[in-house]
Amino acid sequence: MSLTFDFKPNPAPLATEEREGLLADPGFGRVFTDHMAVVQYTEGKGWHSARIQPREAIATDPASSVLHYAQEIFEGLKAYRHPDGSIALFRPDANARRLQNSAERMAMPALPEDIFVESVRALVRTDKDWVPSIPEGALYLRPFVFASEVFLGVKPSAEYIYAVIASSVGSYWKGGVKAISLWATKTYTRAAPGGTGAAKCGGNYAASLIALAEASRQGCDQVVFLDAVERRYVEELGGMNVFFVFADGTVRTPPLGGTILPGITRDSLIRLARDQGLTVEEAPYSIEDWQADAESGRLVEAFACGTAAVVTPIGRVKGDGFDFTVGSGGPGQLTERLHRQLTDIQFGRAADPYGWVQRVV
Ligand SMILES: *Cc1c(COP(=O)(O)O)cnc(C)c1O
């Protein structure tokens, strides 16, 4: 299925000088472009009214079901400026498929892959001047779908709005890559078997914020969630997947299985590591083993990964009755190498043997 996107240009785009001022130091998630992509869904009619239009508020009826029952899913990907001036997306087809999987779990209609990819490409083409040229800068794209039917009954909505907004971003971690500290919460869990942990839905984030506040009170940067059944096995950070690097050169990451979000960065790093001869195990790892291995020196590095921050070293882990340092407490060698290898492909500084990079303009 494909749709043609109507184009309604913004009659009052931001002046060049103002835009360039914002792009010099955009931070993360605060600077938005002139346009957005919108596609609507109506039961019986399917996806329709595809358009690129001025970015503006979306009028929402107070009885829209998303406001009450939280049927909402989203994606996150980036467009990168390459040295030759072209702009490219990284694996947008994988984001399209993941949005479909999230939709299935949340009883929402699947957006066809080609509509997803075209919506993102059309928005990037339209707002290409918003892709920053600063080091590690990119245009962060946020596709999302929410239930818009006006009805208070509990059932899957009969109407949805799919939209893509774009935000110019600098490096996620201001002041360069530095190791983060994690709080291993025993109070809260992120996802239970049979739940929505593998779906990229806003509700998972809403439920995780209180744990982040707990981490903050403990002086930590982020939360690491343990499995909901045994409260032992490391799952993820709630917005980033985790990897462990052992002194013998093997790499481990928790297995997908319904409670962990299948990160596209995670998948790409597994591929990069395996293709340089490293053994990557997708196997459970307990917090007790993490502590013992960090203390014995068997574990030398740990890092978190996701589109927004790419690869982030984990320096320290705290929890109820323990506090340990991983490796040197700073960025490890493999962490730095994988970060560089992946960003070199994304930014067009290295060849892409995988077909991950898709040129837009
Ligand atoms: C988006 C997300 C990730 C990272 O996925 P990427 O595709 O690598 O950006 C990890 N965990 C959660 C909960 C997420 O929502």
Image (cartoon, rainbow, N blue to C red):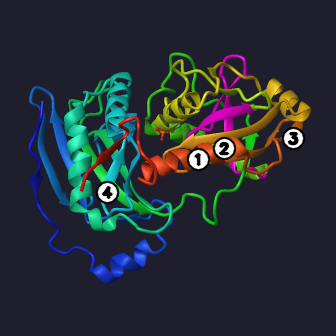
The label nearer to you, 1 versus 3, is 1
For mark 4, does the 10 Å Cα neighbourhood hold few (<14), some (14 to 19), or many (20 or more) residues? many
Mark 4 CB lies closer than 8 A to ligand 1: no
Q: First in sequence: mark 3 or mark 2?
A: 3
Residue position for label 3: 323
Q: Are there few (<14), some (14-19), or many (20+) residues within 10 Å of tag 2?
A: many
The residue singled out by tag 1 in the image is 339
- Going by the numbered disc 3, the residue's amino acid type is Asp
**Rendered residue at 38%/33% (across/down):** 69
* Mark 3 touches mark 4? (CB < 8 Å): no
Give, as a single range, the part of the protein colored magenta. Answer: 219-245
Q: Mark 1 or mark 4, which has the lower sequence index?
A: 4
Label 2, label 1: how many angstroms apart (C-alpha)?
A: 6 Å
Q: Which residue is mark 4?
A: 87
Q: On the image, numbered disc 2 is attached to which residue?
A: 335
Image check: 142 left or right of 336?
left
